[in-house]
Amino acid sequence: MLSRVKIAVLVSGGGTNLQALIDAQNAGIIKSGEISLVISNNKNAYALTRAQNANIKTATVLKSECTDVAEFEDRIIQLLDSNGIEIIVLAGFMSILSANFTSRYKDRIINVHPSLIPSFCGKGFWGLKVHEAALAYGVKVSGATVHFVNEIPDGGKIIMQKAVEVLEGDTPQSLQKRIMEEAEWKILPLSCEKVASDIQRSKNNNL
Ligand code: GAR
């Protein structure tokens, strides 16, 4: 029996994507990995409650308690290392990680973004702003993307994408909700399992 790859989920807010990961783990969709740690950069994030309800270890790292970005990221790295984390999932984590951080975990950090990259992505495009921009442009199809994270915001290799129709009368909120339900909550767990099983297989081949 191969050991499960340890996953950390980084969050900032409501944590519906974290919930989708927890549910997928319980349903056996995520089976090669195990959510071992949830780190929030916001002490009031409801995602922390979701993790605690699922008996997952939590930690909070606040930028306001650090002298600079380097210290903020060092604290996160310490938590990841001391918990033996192999995959880092950014699930609504509203902080851009530096090249120093991302280069340390090449092909080990994955992010879910609420548009079809390369549209409506990069610096400044997060949360509802993404859907406001998609509606302002008038696209008829949007969706979600899961990708590896490198030093370019939303610029890493794409793992999975799913398109979602934009409907007449959509608001940023209604579009956000449909993209979460139809795309994000499906492709994030599937991508997580894919990356975890690839890592598991390559570890096994090196034995
Ligand atoms: C999600 O829609 C996620 O794709 C988006 O924030 C929301 C977090 O919701 N992330 C970004 O915009 C990152 N650029 P959640 O906390 O309920 O998962």
Image: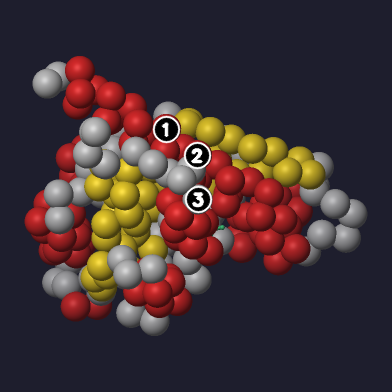
Q: Are marks 2 and 3 in contact (CB under 8 Å)?
A: no
Image quadrant where one finds the C terminus: top left
Indicate the secondary structure of the residue bearing disc 2: helix
Residue 197: x percent and y percent?
35, 31
| Residue carrying label 3 | 27
Whether 38 is drawn above or below 106: the answer is: below
- The amino acid type, in three-letter code, at marker 2 is Leu
Frontmost of labels 2 and 3 is 3
Q: Is residue 49 visible?
A: yes
Q: Are marks 1 and 2 in contact (CB under 8 Å)?
A: yes
Q: Tell me if mark 2 has few (under 14), some (14-19) or many (20+) residues whose alpha carbon lies within 10 angstroms of its own.
A: some
| Residue carrying label 2 | 190
Q: Is residue 122 visible?
A: no
Q: CA distance from mark 1 to mark 2?
A: 6 Å
Can you tell which quarter of the image residue 132 is in? Answer: bottom right
Q: Residue at x 43, y 51 (%)?
A: 25
| Mark 1 vs 3, N-terminal side | 3
Frontmost of labels 1 and 3 is 3
Q: Which disc is residue 194 wearing?
A: 1
